[in-house]
Amino acid sequence: MVGEALGPIGPPFASEAVQQCTVRIANESAEHLNMTPLQDVRSALRCECGDPGCRACVDITHSEYEAVRAYGSHFVIKPDHENSENTAVLRENTRFAVIDVVAGDVRYHVRACNPRHSWIDVRDEGRE
């Protein structure tokens, strides 16, 4: 599903975007299962850096996680796990960093794969 949504974007960022979206979906499921009314309780979620070999976890509170998820192109990563060729660090602390995917086609596709947002691609309207 995630790979299909990415469509025609080329290497080297395509596999990184697929990995980011896959881990984001897993984190969404974990966060949903671990939801608690206490906003300051930390959860250990997977780093969404896009490196398929990364098994790092980030400690993040529910409210911090929700702030990241408010934007479809934002991902939560361990500090210093960003790829400066296609992402920008928006904020960082000792526990995690928040990145924004800024590379054109990759940005479009990670937003399209965001499970929290449903939107219509105007380029595809009228095609059926």
Image (cartoon, rainbow, N blue to C red):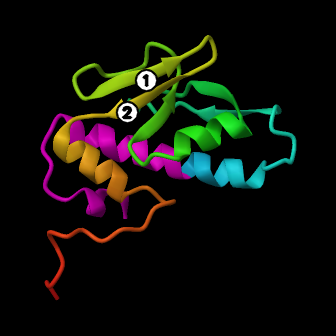
Whether residue 98 is in magenta: the answer is: no
Circles 2 and 1: CB distance less than 8 Å? Answer: yes
- What's under tag 1, amino acid-wise? Leu
Q: Residue at x 63, y 44 (%)?
A: 66
Residue 38: image quadrant is: top right
Residue at the far bottom in the pictured view: 128
Residue 90's tag is: 1
Quadrant where the C terminus sits is: bottom left
Q: Residue at x 50, y 15 (%)?
A: 79
Q: Is residue 75 above or below residue 9?
A: above
Identify whether 8 is placed above or below 75: below
Q: Which mark is residue 106?
A: none
One can see residue 53 in this view: no
- Horizontally, residue 103 falls left or right of residue 22, namely left
Visible residue check, residue 128? yes
Name the residue tied to disc 2: 100
Position of residue 85 measured from the top left corner of the image (x, y, whole percent):
22, 23
SS assignment at label 2: strand
Q: Which span is picked out in magenta?
A: 1-25
SS type, badge 1: strand
